[in-house]
Image (spheres, rainbow, N blue to C red):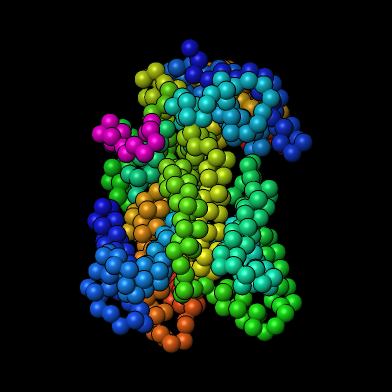
Amino acid sequence: MSLLSVQNLSVTLRGRPVFRDVSFAIEPGEVVGLIGPNGAGKTTLMRAALGLIPAEGRSSLAALEPRVRAKAAAWMPQSREIAWPVSVETLVMLGRTPHLAAGQSPSDADRAVVETVLARMGLTGLRARAATRLSGGEQARALIARALAQDTPLVLADEPIASLDPAHQISTMRTFAALAEEGRAALVSMHDLGLAARHCTRLILLGEGRLVADGPPGAVLTAERLARVFGITAWFSQTDDGPVFQPLEVLR
Amino acid sequence: MIRLMLILAGLVAALFLASLTLGPADIGPGESLRALLSGDGGPLTLVMREIRLPRALLAAMIGASLGLSGAALQGYLRNPLAEPGLIGVSGTAALGAVLAIQTGLSATFALGLPLMALAGALGGVLLILLLAGPRGSSLTLILAGIAISALAGALTSLVLNLSPNPFAATEMMFWMMGSLADRSMAHVALALPLMALGWVLLVTLGRGLDALTLGEDAAQAMGIRLSRLRLALILGTACVVGAGTAVAGAIGFVGLVVPHLLRPLVGARPSRLLWASGLGGAAMVLAADIAVRLVMPERDLKLGVLTALVGAPLFLHLIYKTRRDMP
């Protein structure tokens, strides 16, 4: 069963069409990279799929009641917003919100989930620190941990690795891969095509106001599409160390 | 956490007792409390039940209301500068009150003024709902609140401007400074139901406000219905602030300073801050109302003046402290 299925989704913001007739489905076990140039509508697509903004067409998540949806998919927005200096542990515990009944305080099971996630994102040592005083990359990891603590079959993350150091970029992508191995899935928007090519099982390329391509990285990242949509050339090869993708020159 | 609650609750209880045992009638604390409880119908019982008890009750109720609504608004707007007056309801309530004085309604029957102030508060709520709900953002709420406050302020000035005689103008000015002197149990009875409704609406917001720490998008994706939360926030704040302003006038800075003071003690969690600020606000207004009676017993120092006098420097100090933490 698909964790998310989107059919003919179209979004118009302030009279300007962002994209039209986007359709795709995400199955368990997939790490789907959402790529496309700036302004292609990656964020808009994810928000529309979640039902956070009005859209034409159908999205299986948008059709759900908010509380039910919150147990089906977790969302990590691009803006790293942490309004108050709460501890990292408290911040991650916020991810348990949809699982708590009104007035119920976190149970041992909730705490166990938070422990697992803290360890997974390498945050155990930072648990008592005020989240607002962490570095940008550490904040990003805490917010990813928060989304993971929601413990949903599907995680949607908007540029989660944008401000991370190389080691944490790789380990975060590995975390999404580990989720996929558990039978979950992730939809991750990103600009780093090298990491996308290496760590995603599938790429969705958004551009020109529509879904341009959808498939395994090797099939999506063709020279012709890179030139047309991104305006770049690149070197892409299957090596002994796995797929390696390196953007080279700007074409226009 | 529980310790902080106990300390704050103990503080409120102690200040409440102190407020009850303090007054121009020279009676010992034990004697006055016995008179309050025994109810023998003597003059002392009358003083306790009709003068001091309503005053202490109103101080605690209004303080709790201001603390609670201040914490809720700061949590919703994710801004430590938000305060209960922000949504404009205290402004329109004050307008209703000065109109009651201007028209002579306040002189014709005892509850004329608070009832007119409540009508003003209701007008303010309807206006803000029209402007900012149910699909508006937090920014529309701030802008609508500022616009309504400005309009209510201008109209209040107009009423003052056109007041029939200097005595009426002075009465309006003094009323607007905020005071708990000479209030009766009728005021308590008028304010309590509305405030209780507001408290219930506001304390249920805790989880949503916690989730809002991560921003509106993330909170919504965690199943929080933002439009419902905003509606409960506006109605709850309007109930407590409208009722409070109606019976006591404008008492500033409590709703701003108390959440700010207590935030570090509750780990900055908005849900915990709600409860703590409610208790802290009650303690602060009780203390301030005791202070106005001690500092200048013969001059009728206004409560709102004192809270602003103490609150503003406190706030400056807090800003100074926060500034050091900033990069």
In front of the other: B206 or A186: B206
Residue at the farthest top position: A1
In front of the other: A142 or B274: B274
In front of the other: A131 or A238: A131
At a point 40% along the width and 85% down the height, the residue shown is B297
Q: Is residue B269 above or below residue B304?
A: above
Q: Quadrant of residue A228?
A: top right
Image coordinates of residue A42 in percent, x first then y, are 61, 32
Image coordinates of residue B73 in percent, x first then y, are 51, 54
Image coordinates of residue A223 in percent, x first then y, are 64, 24
At a point 59% along the width and 67% down the height, the residue shown is B109
In the rendered structure, the answer to whether residue B249 lies left or right of residue B68 reads right
At a point 48% along the width and 12% down the height, the residue shown is A1
Residue A174 visible in the displayed image:
no
Residue B57 visible in the displayed image:
yes
Residue at the farthest right position: A15
At a point 53% along the width and 37% down the height, the residue shown is B225
Q: What is the quadrant of the C terminus of chain B in the image?
A: bottom left
Residue at the farthest left position: B30
Tell whether position A97 is magenta: no
How many marks overall?
0
| Span colored in magenta | A99-112
Tell whether position A102 is magenta: yes
Q: Is residue B93 above or below residue A194?
A: below
In the rendered structure, the answer to whether residue B16 lies left or right of residue A11 reads left
In the rendered structure, the answer to whether residue A159 lies left or right of residue B19 reads right
In front of the other: B206 or B238: B238
Q: Is residue B218 above or below residue A223?
A: below
Image coordinates of residue B5 in percent, x first then y, are 29, 56
